[in-house]
Each structure stands twice: as C-alpha cells, then as structure tokens.
Amino acid sequence: MTHPILRPGPYPFWRDEANLLHRRLFERFADPQVIARLYASCAENLRPLNLGQGPDLVWQQALEELARADLLGRLIEVVTAEGPLGVLAEAIERVRAAPPLVSTRVVTSDVLVLDREPLRDQLGRLGPDANPAKVVLVRGLPKSGKSHGRYLFELAAHDQGADALYLSFGMVTTVEEAVLWLFGNLGAGDDAIPPGDSTTSAWYLKVSLALVRWVRERGKPVWIAVDDLGLAPDGGPLMDEKIKKFFDHLAVQLLNPASRRWLRLMLIHYPDDAPPTGWQQDLWCEERTDEASIGEEDVVTLIRNWASGRSQARMTDDHLRDIATNVLAAAATAAAGPEPQPRLPALHAALVAKLRALEATGS
Amino acid sequence: MILGGTPAIYPLARFTDRLAAAGRGVVRVLFDQPVASGWLVTPTLVVVNDFVVGARRGPGPVRCDTGAGDPVEASVAHLAGPANDGRRPALLRLERPLPGTAPLSLDLGTATPGTPVVIVHHPSGMPETQLSLGRMVRLDDGFLHYDADTLTGSSGGPVLGTPDLGVLAMHVSGGPTTNSALPLSAVLDGLREAPHWPEIARLHGLADVAAAREPVVPPSTTPPTAANDALVAAALRWSVDPTELGDADREAVRPLVVDAAARRWSLALDHRQRLLHGAGSLAALRALRHSRPGTEPGSDVVDRILAGPPYDLDALPLDALPRWLQAVRWFDGTLPDLPSPAQVHRTLKRRRVREDLAAVAGPGFRGRTAELALLDGWFAEPQPAPMVLTGIGGIGKSALVARFAELLPPTVPLLWLDFDRVDLAPDDAVSLLTELGTQAGVQLDGFAAPAPDPASWPASASACGAALAAVAPGPVLLVLDGFEIAQHAARHEEIWPVLEGLLASAPALRLLVSGRAPVVNLRLGGQTAVTLRLTGLDPQVAAAWLAERGVTDASVRRQVVEVSRGIPLVLKMAMRLLDAGGSVDDLPSVMVEGYLYHRILDRVVDAELQPVVRDALQLRAVHAEMLAAVLHDRMPPGVEPSALLARLSRELAVVESLDEPEKVGPGVLRLRPEVRSAVLRLLADADPSRVAEVDGRAAAWLAEQASDDSADATELVYHRLRLGDVTGAGTAWREGCAARLTTAAEDLFDPAARQWLLDKLSETSVRLAAWEQDAADRIRTANKRGLARIVPGTLAEHRGRTAESPLVVHDAWVRWQARDPAGAAVVLDEAGPATGPVGRDRTLVRAGLAVDAGDLTTADRLLAGIADEALWPDPLSALAVQAARTRLTVDLEAELALAEMSEGLWTREPAGELVAAIRTRVAPGDVLLPSLGAHVAGLTTLPLHLPERRDELAEFASAVHPRRRRLRDHRPDDAPTGALPMHVERVRELADRLGERGEQRWQLATTTLLLIGLRDRALAAASAPPDPLTLAVVASLAAFRGLPLTIDSRSVRNIDDLLGRVYLRARAIQAEADRSDLAWSITAGEQQRSGARGGTSSPAIRTVLLYVLSPDPLTLLIRRALGLPDDERER
C-alpha cells in the first residue's frame, strides 16, 4: 500500500497532516534561499521555484513539485538532516503516521462502512503503478453491501490523488451514453470520442485508448466504479450487457503500463462467470460480500473510530460492546419486523441513528 | 526470552513516570482514623467505595490526605443508594485540592486474564502510599478478580492496567484466593448518576453512555409508499436536475437518489419501484405524467409504457430497447402486461445479431458483387468446405462478411465470433462454446446446450453441435472474424477441435474465417478450406463511391482510385484529405501516414512517442544506445535515450512486455512482430530512402559493436538482408542466429536476400529450436491467463527437445501435476543441465521434486547452486532461494510432536531422562514454537544483535556457534543400554532431527547475508502490505525467532515484534488464520502448553502463524518460472 501523502501525485492539501507539514515548514524555514537549497537537495533538474513570493507560497510550490516527482520522502530526509526541528519534527511524524483514507469507517454522518477489511486491503494495493492488479471485481448476493464498497473505492482514489467516478443503473442505459458520461465527467467534449466506423470491439478499443489519452493529458488519474453489471434476481441483466463488455475491454488497457498509471476500475455486481479470457490472472482481484459478515466487533471498531475524532466521546470497551449489542438488536428487529428490511441497510440505519443520538448528547 | 507469548517489557523511564503520577492520584480516607483508600477522578473529586461513606466508619468529618499529613476536609458528594455492597462508587468532594496531587487517567480497554495489574493503596491505613503487583485472574459476577496483595484499608484503591497505569478497576474486597475490584465501566456507570458527572466527563472526554444505551429506533430504510407527487413524478423520469426542484421537493428526493453529488439525479431502483407501485394505478401514473411531463432523452420510452399494452418489442427501434430493459424494471409488478426484463434482453440480443451487421457493413457499402456471388454459391453447396477470406487491414473483410450475412434469409441463424473481443480466444474452448451457446440461444427457440465444461470441452462441443442441429437443421453461418489476432499469437490450440466437434454433430454449419493472414493447410470436417483473397474495390465501384461523396472531378477520382488501389480504408482517408482541402498529390504519403496513425500509432498512448515509434518499427529489438545511434533525429528534444526507452517500454500496443527480460536481454525492448509485419511494406512504399537510412544506420551501429553476442549478430544479419547485402549477412552469421530469424523472411523485400535466409533456415535443428521458443511463449501466456489445461497439448506438438530447451521444465511440471513426480524427475535428469535461466529453472523444479520426495539434502544442494544473485532478474528472487533453503531446515511437524510428547515433563525436578534428551540436542534457536523454545535450555537468553553488514557476520557467527558446540560437547552418553521405551526413542529421534536442522539453519544465517536481507524486506513489509513473494520470503525470518535477536530499528525490537507487524499488514493471512484448522490447533496448543495469553494478539503466535500460512517461496519461484500466477486460480 502506498503512503497516502508520501507518494507521487498532487500534494494532498486536503489532509490535515499535509497542511500541518506545510505550515511547520514555512515557519521553520522562512528564508527563500534556504528553501531553494533544501529543494535543490532533493533531486537534480527540478523546476525552479518562484522565490519572489512569501515563504508559505514558495513552500507550497516546492511541495507540489516534489509531490509530483515522488520526492516528498526525500524532502523529509533532507529537512531532518538540518538539525533540531522543534515542532516540525512532530509534523513530520504525523505525516509519516498518516492513516490512509481507505481505512476510514465514518465516511460522512450518513455513510458508514463497517468491516470490508479485504476490500480495504485490495484497494490499498491497487494504488502502486507497479502492481499489475488494477481491477477489483465485487460480487455477492443482493443487499450484501456490494455497492457500498464504492465509498472505500473513492477514498482509496483520493489517497492516490485521483478523481473517482461512479456509474450505475439508472444513470445511463446504453454503452454510448456510458462513454459520453465518462468523457463528460472528465471534462472532455463529444469530439474527444472516436467515431464508431468499425466493429463494436474495434470501437471499444479506440474509445479506451482515447479515454486513457484524455486522462493522461488531464494529468490526474481517475478511478471508475461501475455498478449493476450483473443480473437481477429475476435472471435478466440490470443494464445493457454492452456496457459491461466495454468495461471488460477498458480493463485490458490496464495491462499496458502506459495506461495503467491513469485508470483503476471497480466493477460491482460483476457476473459470477469467469472474467474475460483476455484478462491476465494478476490484472484483477475479487471481493465477495456477505450479508452476515458484520458482527459486534465491527460495530465496536466503527464507534471507536467515530469517537476518536471527537472531544468528549470516550467509552470503555464494555460500554462500546453494550452499544454494539443494542445496535445489532435494533437491526435484527427491523429485519424480522412486519415489513422486513435487509439486514445490512437496517444495521446501517440503526448505527447512523445511534451516532446521531450520541452526537445529540454532546459527544 | 519472551515467556508466554506477549512480551511484558516496558521502557523503564516511562513506567516510573507513570507510576509516580499514579501515586499522586491516590489518597487516604480518614474519619478519626484512616479507613480506606480513594482516588482522584478530578482535582477535588475522590472516588471511594459506597460502604466507606455509607456506613460511616467513624465519628467526625471525613477527610483525605496523601499520607503526608495536612488532611483536607471532604463532603459526601454522591452516594447512590442504601445497598452499600461495593457495586456503586461514592464521591467525596475535597474542600480544596490536596497539594501535589493530580487526577488519575482512565484505562478504557479490556483487561484479559493474565494481564499484569498494579494496585496503589494505603493498606492498613499506612501513611505511605503502597504498591502491590499481580495479574488479572477473571471477570465474573460484575467484579474483576486479581491476585495482587491487599489489606484492610486498601478498599477504594485503584487497580491500574499496565503499562500505562490508567484506572482499570477499584478495589472492593479481599478473598481467600483472589481479591475483587469494581471494573471501570461499572464505576463510571455509578458516577454517571452523580450531579458531578458533567465535570468528570469533561475532564476525561467521556461520552454520555446512558444516552447511547437507549434503545435505538432506526428509521425505515424503505421509502414511504404514500409519497407526494413530486417523488412519483421524479420516479417517472430518467433523471432530474436538482436545481429545477423546489427546496422541499429537492430535500424529499435527495435521500432516494443514487448519487446526490451528481449533476443530474437518478432515483435508486428500489425507491423508484416502491414509489411507482404505491401510486395506485396506471391511470394515476398517467395523470401525474401528464401534469409533469418528462423532456430528457428517453422520455418517449416512459410515455410509451404508460400508454399501455400491447407492447410489441419487435416494432420498437433497436436503440430504444436498452432503455426499455431498465424502464420495465421500474414498473415491476405494477403494469402486468409489460414485458419482463428477460424478454426485452432476449429481443435486444436477437435483433442485434442482424441489425448490428448493417453498422459493420457500413451504410455506404458498394460493389463486391463477384465476391458476394461467390459466397452465395459457397453457402448454397450441400456441405461446403470452410471458406477463408484474407486481405490486408482496411480492405473491407468484415464489411463484406457482414453484408453477406445481412443478405441471407432471416431464418438462417448467424453465429459470429469476433476475435477482437476480450472475452473470446481461440485457445479457450470454453469462451468459444459459451459465446456460441449464447448466440444460438437468442436466435433459436428451444436451443439448449449444456454449459461448457473446461475439463471435458470436446464433449461440450459435440453437445453444442447436436443441440444446434436439433433446432436448426438447415444451414447455419459461423463467422470467425479478426482471426489474424489468434494467428499472430499462435494461440489457436482449442478452436480447431471445437470446430471439428461442432461440424461432426452439425454438418449444416458453414464456416467462414476472416483474417489478414492466410490460414495455411486448414482442413475441417474432412475438407480442405478454400481461400478467397480480397483485393481493392473494382475501380468503377470505387470511383462511383467517390462520386456519391461529392468528388465531381473525374481526374481526381481516377487518381484517388489509382493510388488507393480501391482499398476502402484508404478511400475514406482520401475523402477526409479532400474534405479538409488537401491535394490528391499528397495522397501517397497521407495513405501511409493515415494507415499508420489510424491502425497502429494511434494505439501509442504517449503521443510524443509516435514519430520515434514510426521508425522504431523497422527495428526488431531496441535498447537505449541503439536508440541514440539510429533514431537520434526522431527523438523528442531533451529526452535522454534511457528515459525514452523507459517510456517506450510502457507502450504495449507496439512493444512486448518487459516482464521476461531473459528472453531478449535486460534493457532490451522487442517491437511486436505482428505490428511490424503490418507496416513494413507501407513504410517501404511511402519513403524507401528513409527506410534504407534506418536499416543502414542500424547495420552500421551493430557492426561497430564487435560483439560475439549472437543476439547482436542476428540483428546485424537482419538489417544487412533488409539492405539486400547477402554477402555481409553471410559474414555476420553466427550459430544461434537462425532460431531468432525464423519469421524474418516476410520482412525481406529483396528476393535474393529472402531466398538466402530461407535456405539457411531449412535445417531441422533450427526449426525445432524456433518452435520451442514459440511454444514456450504460448505456454507462458496460457498459464498467465489460467489456461494451464492447454499446456500438455502444446508440448505434444513436437516430441524432440534441444539441449537448451525451455520446454523441459514444462514437460516436468505437467508430469508432476499429473501425480507422476518420478516421471517428472526422469524428464529433468534425462535432459541434463542447461545454461542461464533455462538451467536455473530446471534446477528449481528439480529441487521442488526433491522436497516432494522428502529428500531435503538434495533439495538444499540444488538450491544452493542457484542462489547466486547474478542468476536472477531481481534480488528478491535470489533471496527467495535462500528463504526456501531456510524453510528446509524447519520441521514444524516434529516440533509439534515433541511439544506434545514432552508436555508436563518440564517442571519435574530433577529433569527426567526425556527432558535431558531434548535439552542436550535442541537449542532454543532450533525451534519455532514458543512453548518448546521456552523450555529448551542450553543457550543464553542474552540478546544477540542481528548483523547489519557482511563484516559483522564473523562476530555474529562467533556468538552463535560456540554455544551450539558447547551444547553438543556436553551431551551425556545416552546411548541406549537396553531396550528403551518406544516414546523415549521417538523423543530422541525428533530432538536429533531438530538439532541437525537447527545446525544447518544457523550455518546459513552465519555464512550468508540472508538475515540482513530478510530483516530489510520485513521492515518494508511491516509498513505496506507485501506482495506474495515478499511475504513468502519475509515469513522465513520466523525460523530464527528462537534466539533473542535484536533489530536495530527505531521502533522494532525483535523478530516477533517485526513479524507481528507484518502479520497485521497481511490481511489475507489474518483471514486464513481465522479459517484454518491448523492455525487454530497451533494457537490453542500453544496456549495450553505455555499458558500463552492473547491468542493471535501475541506477536510470537502471529510469527508462527505468519510462517505457517504464508506461501512457500520455492513453490512461488517455480510457479513464476513457469509463468503461472502466484495462486492457483484456474479457469
């Protein structure tokens, strides 16, 4: 798993740890000449800094350049060699210890992700360009949490400084619409889409290449999650199967190292058949969801995770377990009620309600 | 030595600081006399037992002190009730803070039996604060039982957890075997009832658990059925723009949409279905739709559905059906006559079979009358031979076949296998049969073929043919389109038998193969294929086509037709040129450039590389120096050759993957032969002087290298032949060239040069070596795609093998997998040694076979012979060899047996015969199991520093080996003097074996850089999830856990600590540990034998589990050598 800050890509100013490092750097090294010296020590042939601005802006530029060149780790070595660092040392330690976003459990107050450790692990490994695995297939029974994994996929994308897109049933109906939607969401005009003047497969190939080229020119990777690719319980497909076939072709592009840096795919509700014969075995990994997988320990971990970011929310393990039992019982009641609800949505709703109740008490 | 699993070793300074702080939080409670202890939860609130203040232990005011005099008066701030049974704490409020005191911190975690605890108290009212040490014993009846000593007056003393010394419980009473304390959660529950709770909660950041414990009533996850009109109207639309909704409607719709962050909102299916179902009736839906019509694309589909039956799917436009597929699902159960999604899907697929042909043929399809007539005649024959349609790219093969199929009667079933598709491959029978079954199923009512079985696909092919013949007795057209892809990769192992099987049971099948290259000697169904070579369009047809597109000048038309030779793709390019205002004089170069960019260079992702790729396609293989020498005038400015090569290496559309550097040499890129063959003639036609220039530069540069390397000589021969220099090629020819030039003749346009090469290649041994290389490539590709089942067939194509054959390892592997390890060994032994990677891989597989046969000595000897890093493409693989050797020295089965047999003996005094037998044979460093290692005596428990560098190895060895020798030298003469009980003999035997293996292991550790390599890899793996080979390598470090080796790292102490961290990163191992019976039995056994605490939370246990559950490095090396994926996924 690549480090969520010390990795190539845009400098993650959206993270507190990265912001703190920036602040401590310009507080500790405010002289532009010193900044330039430290910067130049990281590597040769770096783009020159604009030293005619405030130290905060010089450092901002330096961090952005070094992050793009995967030299933040080297910067830390260089800076550390400068002697006593005071509070900068603490900022460096926080950066080093920064947890990946993909380990998050409370995504928003309405979106909680329990468990899913194998998926978090797989998504963490999807990041490094050198790893051939670039596609995650998510399979499982209805209401077992398949679609919910997209939130982790988005977090993992942000860990890598990438954008994330999500496409599902209802958003598009044909492969042409799916392609338009993809290019449109990436800021490309219709003219960026190659015309379909040959066989369908040949067009898929052309579109895949055009998409990779567009993303590359855009300079920021994109992680694409596509949902509802399989069959409904009635045996019919949810979406036109050409949509799945297009993404099957796009996935093959990720065997190509020139493309693999720019795209990742999460194919959700993927059919249970073997993946396309043209995929190499190491191109993809798989998560199988299970409605019964969530237990007390997962709920405890989530509440503890939620509490750790708050000023007055500490609880003993015994109390955490009491609450988890309470939440699981509420979900079980809802699942067995007169209008039975699927277990996982009911559990999610109960947990959201519980955290709201805790928040209302001042926690 | 860590005893019992969890290391209980703490930094002294931190512990003493915390202990001092703990002392500052404990007070003595006095009436007239000291009666109890208490602890500060805030600076002025003291927690005591309820019975201390409830029963009034004495007259006078209650006071508190620290034992140092000057007590401070206190008042009872809270007393829960009359019970006074120690289950509810009481609170005292000090008049003022006691000098030098501070509140204690709280330990919110869970104490498990065995956890060390500390009680700080004033037993018997002693003024000086006292400390007692013990362990938690159990938790029952609402109390925590522990075994630290207490006396009267200890009540209320805080029981602190280690090592942080936060309050875990409060002492309540003593007992005969254990003392009792009220757990912190119960203490806090009691304090929560006090009016002072907010003050306590604020200081310690505690949540209001009482509120949290209230039963939760989750909101329903289903939307309201009696919804408002806005929601139902939204459910009738494909998507809505949220900004067009009123505030209230927007907030009502928001929770029901798929993605609230999207620019347009679509309702989630289950919400949509429920809303529409709840609307009541079709009339109600129509009325609502009428008042709030949809305008977004696809609204006509919704309106048509709401218009009611009959619904004739065949009458709908084809491109509307994908919308119907989704929309009918919205109304699931609401509109009874609506077709089901499965019906829509089947109609869509069936109609696509023919209607998509129009798109392939193109709306402007013209001419080809003769070809269509020929195909018609062929199709009408009673049992025609297969037809092969060939022609260059862009000639219109697919268009012709599509047009031909389109014109067939609608009753003729059409089966079309397009090998551009990623889910179809001619070497994967299952993919072929699955697709054929699907296509037949949608066109033919009653078609039912069993799902193809990978293990018996020939039978599946026959069954598919029989099912086809049963429902379609008349002619059926089967098209194999884009077949050149399969030909170039020589991957068509399974398609011909599949077709034979189909034809045998469905003789009415007409097979039409379309591809750029001819299919030589194709014979199916007992008939030899006929070939139709497609050339350009008839000049008149081509001219008419241009005229239809507005080319009014007849001379221009004539010129275009002449230059384009009637090739449809070039005609289209010419039209684009003319439309853009270009001149027909530019057409020759536009034709080549257009073709190149349209078909080849457009696949190069990095657009800056396209010019250099254009010239590089003349070279078969290229490396950085050659780039600089040959293509310097095409290189992007400012880019170093090595950087350019790295960028090129990522363009797998034109170069081959670098994952097999041994095939072409390190740092060498091989241009894809099928791409080169498609463009070489075009390049020669377009700019012959540039082509000669590139070949000339390449030949000159290669000649200057003066290398004996046959790879360089081969390329020199190649470029000289391209230049027509047969004499020069003859001079450069070396042994080994021929195997590399087997397909080069087609690149030579000089007839003499071509013939010269063909003559050279006619020798048998050369042909065999070339086939072996090709077959090895195919096998690796098949293995990577999980198609190992086709490997035996590939190997059987030729029986002979050259001395350096890369196929021998595959021959052996196939036998091994067929449970014939002896046969596999014979294959390797008969083949004998080979050089380079081929020889290395043979040794690897031979070592695997030796392990399989239990011959560990041979396995180790073989592995030692290939441990040199120079033999491997990367240092990790070389380290994996040493890791594999390490694993050979571990015998966990023997350890478990010994541990079990010796259970209960260790504590006997004096040590019995069995114990002596073990202790004089086995050293702690020889075993992995913590329980066994803890009992084995003999070596020091003083830490040894793990070596950092090679020059520290000698010192390390001098620390390890003398102790072992001492052990051996002092072994008592325990040779059997008579018949010994069987189990004594068995114990000696096991102990001897472990001792011998231990000796080998530590020899390895003290004579190689193994430990240093393992440590470095493990440190990296502790911070990022390791890949399988790294994990396999790193886990081998566990073999050395028995000695207290310290690791010089910021935070890692020893091997258990390090591998415990790796374990936490390896989630798959953790999951396996939860499932595996072996893991359970090891964990449970260790806990039982040693009383080890914590199960898998113990680093020592984690280390053992990591070792047991990690992949075997030797297995992984073998699998990688064969091109197999690391795990055993098989299609």
Image: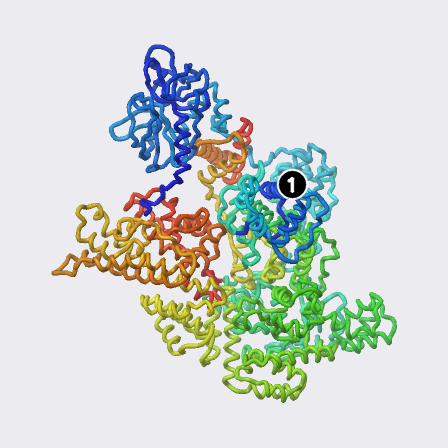
Near mark 1 (Cα within 10 A), the count class, few <14, some 14-19 or many ≥20, is: some
Q: Quadrant of residue B16?
A: top left
Residue occupied by mark 1: B260
Front residue of A209 and B145: B145
Q: Is residue B265 left or right of residue B64?
A: right
Residue type indicated by callout 1: Ala
At a point 28% along the width and 46% down the height, the residue shown is B1089
- Taking the image as shown, residue A291 lies to the left or right of residue B139, namely right
The answer to which quarter of the image holds residue B817 is bottom left
Q: In the rendered picture of this protein, how many numbered marks are placed on residues?
A: 1
Q: SS at mark 1?
A: loop
Looking at this view, is B847 or B263 the one in front? B847
Q: Is residue B439 above or below residue B233?
A: below
**Quadrant in the rendering for residue B64:** top left
Q: Chain of mark 1?
A: B
Q: Position of residue B1114 (x, y in %)?
A: 41, 64
Residue occupying the far right of the picture: B553
Q: Relative to B333, is B1124 above or below?
A: below
Left or right: B187 as drawn, with respect to B446: left
- Pick whichever, A216 or B529, lies toward us: A216
Please tell me which residue lies in front, A221 or B296: A221
Q: Is residue B179 left or right of residue A225?
A: left
- Residue B1077 visible, this angle: no
Regarding residue B100, the answer to whether it shows in the image is yes
- Indicate the position of residue A22 as horizontal and vertical percent values: 62, 43
